[in-house]
Amino acid sequence: MRAALWLLALFGIASAVALFAGNNEGTITVFWPPTRVDLSLNLVLALLVLLFVGLHFALRALTALFSLPRQARQWRLQQKERNLHVALLDAMAQLMAGRFTRARKSAQAALAQERTLAALDAELPQARQLRVMAHLLAAESAQSLQDHPARDAHLQQALNDRDERGGPSLLPELREGLQLRSARWALEDRDPAAALGRLAELPQGAQRRTLALRLRLKAARQAQRTQEALETARLLAKHRAFSPVAGPTIVRGLVSEWIAAAHDPLQLQRVWSELDPGERAMPEIAIQAAQRMVQLGGEGAIARGWLLPVWERVVAAPDALGDAWRMKLVQVLEAGFDEVDADWLARIESAHQQHPRDPLLQYLAGIACLKRQLWGKAQQHLSQAARSLGGGPLARRAWVALARMADSRGDTAAAAQAWRAAAEADL
């Protein structure tokens, strides 16, 4: 369609020219003394057009001739810029492939190409970003090669990079990225203090990013700063940086470390008060905290208060907690039976009545009756519990308690049989 339109336009122009030139009888007389030259107007117009076209092409030829040096220089700069990008991409590829020496050489080649372009006064777009990325790749390769002086040198050159016109040193994103990478390098070198220092230099908003929080969590755990690591893990869980299974597991592990690090009952109570309600509701945390309180010689009433939600949960659904943690729960409660109050004794008796076949509740009820000097019930519950438990520490304790009751009432045969069963329970 376009070709047909052009053809019609050419026919139109040709027709107009023919009409104008066919009936044009004008002449132009040129006087060049002593000569007189008569020329047709059509010929003069044709000569003028040819002269204009010739001058136009002559000027274009001269312009192209004089622009050859500039075009040659521009071509050379383009080649150098292309070599710079090729070297930078090669450094990235070699680094991902694990060829760290080649990656560092390629990054250094990119830096050399950039310095050459700068010496030629070439205006390279995003020159600082390219320099920083080249320094970062060289530093990353040096870190993998354990060349820490070279790594630090490239890092400082990247951080101190400045615009030739005296502008700002680095874009915020580049500086934050360099600081995050240096923090990761410090973690790889087992230097958590340096990593935390680098992370502290970040702006407030950057410190709350998921990557920064992950690095802070690792650094805090390496530095054994359990409280700081727990706070960081809470933020990561809030940002959904963990899977639904991994998040509670990590938080529970950190809380356990924090509880185990308490050296006196007051410190343990402060730790417990700083826990979130959801963390206090974890049965494993409550049992461990109560066990630690008993080990430190603290008040048993406080420990049993921490255990009350767990106890109610176990009574409502005995299978809701694993056998290992149920056993620990029984052991913690048993350790504080010397000062147990009537409310807890009533709770234990009620739980045993609800689940009479549960050997752990039978054992706990038997020990409770033994502390209250109810010898008959104690012997009945402990005998059933010892046979149901089979072996293990609780079975051994039940047989030991039965042996001592038999000794106290002078039943030597029953005592010997109980002592023998206690010894076999440890095997």
Image (cartoon, rainbow, N blue to C red):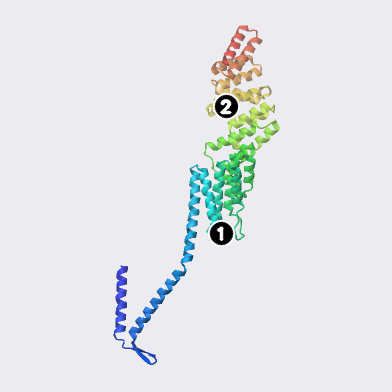
Question: In the displayed structure, would residue 117 be above or below residue 176?
Answer: below
Q: Earlier in the sequence, mark 2 or mark 1?
A: 1
Say few, some or many: other residues with alpha carbon within 10 Å of mark 2 (under 14 / 14 to 19 / 20 or more): some
Q: Nearer the viewer, mark 2 or mark 1?
A: 1
The picture places residue 344, in percent across and down from the top left corner, at 64, 25
**Location of residue 266 by image quarter:** top right
The quadrant the N terminus occupies is: bottom left
Question: In the displayed structure, would residue 245 be above or below residue 386?
Answer: below
**Label 2: element kind:** helix
The residue at 64%/46% (across/down) is 200
Residue 325 numbered tag: 2
**Location of residue 47 by image quarter:** bottom left
Residue 119 numbered tag: 1
Closest to the observer: 142 or 283?
142
The picture places residue 229, in percent across and down from the top left corner, at 62, 39
Question: In the displayed structure, would residue 63 be above or below residue 269?
Answer: below
Q: Amino acid at mark 2?
A: Trp
The quadrant the C terminus occupies is: top right
The picture places residue 273, in percent across and down from the top left corner, at 66, 36
Residue at the outermost bottom position: 34
**Label 1: element kind:** helix
Closest to the observer: 85 or 200?
85
The residue at 58%/29% (across/down) is 312
In this picture, residue 395 sits left or right of residue 81: right
The picture places residue 88, in percent across and down from the top left corner, at 50, 51
Q: Amino acid at mark 1?
A: Ala
Q: CA distance from mark 2 to mark 1?
A: 72 Å
